[in-house]
């Protein structure tokens, strides 16, 4: 697991983040959770496995230089979180008292209605790819973007009413999760389900209730993240992928449990670091850094035409086409564009942004801040494997939350007493 000096640097950043856990009652400190997740993910993903038919596969080999990139990113994240935590807070907006609270609730309902209508249209026009086996890459990107508004709409509804809804109060979020599974976008379903759990955890004070929420989050990860992906692989995967999973299982006729464990290792923990390793080996030795083209492609992806983002660029480099989306972990897109220094700077910025939202959520406690922190924490956690290359998740939903909080409109001007006089 720890085979290079850089891997010990990653371990050190996690231990330093843990030192702050004794201050206050901040059990969901994003730096400790994210750096711990990065350490575990790459620790498991870089375990030495020897499978002769796949020793030279770009989707399997992991060079030691991967840990160097991870170390740069981890140090940057730790620094960004420290700066955010020690900068003074400005007075914020977005309270739920009086007219402001009604405005936030109304905007949350509007987002939820738009999202549900778009999600229904998306399922009807795509034929539910998770069930039918249709290619989800052909789903309309615009309907997908609008359907994602159900995520902030649902979270805002929960945060501005009651975090303990009675009887059927949890039915709408659960139904939205199932609907997203029908589209085949497992990440979106996980994002909504886990964000609801984090939001509930922030509101609860009973240790027993919080433990039950953590158990629910683990169940969601196992059912959606592992079980659904395993079922989809067995049903729709090509023979080469199945042979690869069976090779990892190291049995000619493996049991379902062993085959499932092999799937988790190969498709969750191994693929991301392996793709990152391919990018690290290729750039800049054989090809220059893309110098912002991947980031620009992500930011301009809503425009008509094809804008190559990190996933499409890496897919072309690895398999020669954009037939599938290859994940390169949370570090891959930034390394592809700017190298290890860019990884550190971008991770510092990401930590600073989430750190400011964390302070607002845990001190001021307004619902929009809590929703933003729950969403951001889950998004970063999922991005450890999936990366941050989706415009809808990185830009659209945060903009929707800012709009719901009234941050996109100018603040009201104070009356000038001299003029009145």
Image (cartoon, rainbow, N blue to C red):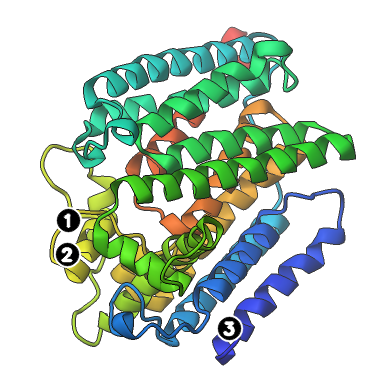
Residue 315 sits in which quadrant?
A: bottom left
At 51% from the left and 40% from the top, the residue drawn is: 190
- Res 19 label: none
- Circle 1 — which element? loop
- Which circle's residue, 1 or 3, is located before the other in the chain? 3
Which label number is shown at residue 7?
3
Single out the mark in the foreground, 1 or 3: 1
Q: Which mark is on residue 316?
A: 2
Give x and y (percent) for residue 3. Answer: 56, 90
Which residue corresponds to the image point at 77% horizontal and 39% vertical from the top-left?
A: 363
Asked if the residue under mark 1 is in contact with the one under mark 2, i.e. CB atoms within 8 Å, the reply is yes
Of all residues, the one furthest to the front in this rendering is 253
Describe the element under mark 3 as helix, strand or loop: helix
Q: Mark 1, residues whose alpha carbon is within 10 Å: few (<14), some, or many (≥20)? A: some
Instruction: Name above or below for residue 3 compared with residue 228.
Output: below
Residue name at image x 64 percent, y 20 percent: 170
| Mark 3 closeness class: few <14, some 14–19, many ≥20 residues within 10 Å | many
Question: Pointer 1: what residue?
Answer: 322
- Mark 2 vs mark 3, CA separation in Å: 29 Å
């Amino acid at each position: 697991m720890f085979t290079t000096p850089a891997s010990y640097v990653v371990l050190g950043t996690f231990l330093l983040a843990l030192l702050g856990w004794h201050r206050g009652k901040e059990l969901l400190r994003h730096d400790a959770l994210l750096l711990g997740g990065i350490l575990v993910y790459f620790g498991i993903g870089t375990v030495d496995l020897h499978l002769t038919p796949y020793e030279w596969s770009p989707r399997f080999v992991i060079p030691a230089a991967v840990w160097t990139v991870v170390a740069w990113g981890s140090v940057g994240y730790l620094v960004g979180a420290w700066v955010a935590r020690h900068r003074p807070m400005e007075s914020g907006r977005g309270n739920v008292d009086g007219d402001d609270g009604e405005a936030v609730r109304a905007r949350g309902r509007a987002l939820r209605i738009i999202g549900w209508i778009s999600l229904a249209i998306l399922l009807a026009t795509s034929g539910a790819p998770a069930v039918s086996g249709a290619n989800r890459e052909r789903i309309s990107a615009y309907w997908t973007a609008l359907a994602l508004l159900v995520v902030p709409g649902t979270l805002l509804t929960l945060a501005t009413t009651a975090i303990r809804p009675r009887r059927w109060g949890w039915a709408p979020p659960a139904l939205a999760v199932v609907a997203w599974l029908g589209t085949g976008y497992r990440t979106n379903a996980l994002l909504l389900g886990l964000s609801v759990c984090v939001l509930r955890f922030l509101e609860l004070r009973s240790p027993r209730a919080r433990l039950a929420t953590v158990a629910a989050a683990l169940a969601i990860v196992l059912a959606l993240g592992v079980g659904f992906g395993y079922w989809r692989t067995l049903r729709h995967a090509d023979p080469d992928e199945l042979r690869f999973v069976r090779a990892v299982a190291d049995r000619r006729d493996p049991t379902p449990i062993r085959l499932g464990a092999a799937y988790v290792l190969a498709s969750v923990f191994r693929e991301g670091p392996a793709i990152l390793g391919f990018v690290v080996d290729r750039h800049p030795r054989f090809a220059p850094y893309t110098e912002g083209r991947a980031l620009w492609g992500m930011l301009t992806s809503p425009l008509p035409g094809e804008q190559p983002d990190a996933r499409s660029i890496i897919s072309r480099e690895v398999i020669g086409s954009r037939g599938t989306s290859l994940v390169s972990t949370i570090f891959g897109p930034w390394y592809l564009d700017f190298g290890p220094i860019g990884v550190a700077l971008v991770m510092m910025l990401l930590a600073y942004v989430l750190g400011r939202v964390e302070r607002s959520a845990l001190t001021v406690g307004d619902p929009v801040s809590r929703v933003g922190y729950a969403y951001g924490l889950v998004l970063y956690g999922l991005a450890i494997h999936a990366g941050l290359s989706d415009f809808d998740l990185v830009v659209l939903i945060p903009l929707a939350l800012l709009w719901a909080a009234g941050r996109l409109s100018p603040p009201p001007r104070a009356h000038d007493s001299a003029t009145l006089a």
